[in-house]
Image (cartoon, rainbow, N blue to C red):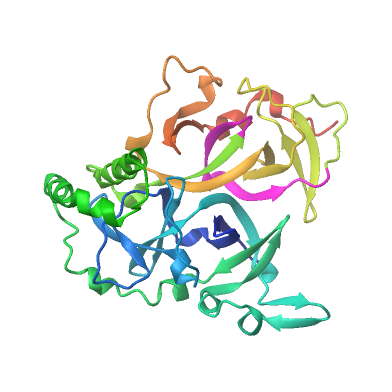
Amino acid sequence: MKKKPFITFSLNGSRYGIEALYVEEIFFLPELTPVTEVAPNIAGVLNLRGKIIPVMDLESRLGYETQEYQVSDSVIVLHSEDILMGIIVNQVHEVQIIEESEISTQFSQGRSKHTLKKSLHWPSMTPCMRGLVQVENHIIMILNIETLLQPVETEELAGIDPGIEEEEFISENEQFHAHSRTLFCPHASQKEREVFYSRAKNLRQSLAHEDIKGLMPIAVIGLNEEYFGIDLELVREFTPIERVTPIPCCPPHIVGNINLRGEIVTLVNIGFILHLNYNRVPLRAVVVATEDFVVGVVVDKVFDVIYLSKSQIKPIPTAVHVVDEEYLRGTVAYQEKMMGLLDLKKVLNHSELRVNEAS
């Protein structure tokens, strides 16, 4: 059965998912420049490193009444064929690995089953949905990317020059700034407006001499209340941990084995190598596959997938000694905090993480 990663997020009290394949990047909501000539579902546009990107008010697109934007909201940038567009969401959650067969276009109501189109009370939302899926304690509505972006006429943005120079754009934006803020989040505080504006300014900055296609996909995980990034190319899947079988004669950081659809996968706790006091009950694992082994790394949570350029990776600050620097490739800003990028291959090749097969 075919499994795919989905980015999940909250909007208006409900959970949604969209294929990670279509996700270009994720960042906190910046100040948007309104453009009155485009479709009413478009909240505005932003300059993303020289590209003018329309940003959709997803609540409006799905048939809800638009709520006031918050500084905690995020933008997920989607790409489909020749369309590049952002959608505004309330909160981005974990990456979920979902089998296609688990996505249902029907749900039970009493003894009968009804199709989504006939039974949901939001007719404008129905065409944008592929179906529903139950993941742990949440029902996630899976969005159809093609239908979601279909009504947007990107040609309407043709009059906006994406090659505008940085200084020129800033100058024009400064002139329009007071008026723009009146339209965008008019009830935000002065401090919140400054946050929105600062984010927009940072997103305009160009990645000088770098190829966008060379961005590195990174899975963001939580471990002992810290953020860490791991190379997504090493990740085979994310899975909840339901039952663990202990392995005799192994140290405590070898958590045990799980049966993953008939495959026995050993779980390891990498906290001791990173000098983290991590002794929680494992609830989730990142299944990592290399040319030498397949292993499950226990984590608290999987947050999202981001795409990094080499210029975003910074050296490890000398004053920071949260984890063993030997296993970090550098640090990067994530959600206004600093996140360590793990050299996961090096961590997993630590001699004490090797399970004696003869045991």
239 in the magenta segment: yes
Residue at 38 percent of width and 69 percent of height: 41
**Residue 292 appears in the picture as rendered:** no
119 left or right of 188 in image? right
Residue at 13 percent of width and 51 percent of height: 172
Q: Quadrant of residue 139?
A: bottom right
**Majority SS type along the magenta span:** strand
Q: Where is the N terminus found, in terms of image quarters?
A: bottom right
Residue 123 point in image, percent of width and height = 54, 80
Q: Quadrant of residue 293?
A: top right
Residue 4 point in image, percent of width and height = 59, 61
227 in the magenta segment: yes
- Is 118 placed above or below 229 here? below
Please give the range of residues in magenta.
223-243
39 left or right of 247 in image? left
**Residue 317 appears in the picture as rendered:** yes
237 left or right of 256 in image? left
Extreme right residue here? Answer: 248
The residue nearer to you, when weighing 131 against 123, is 123
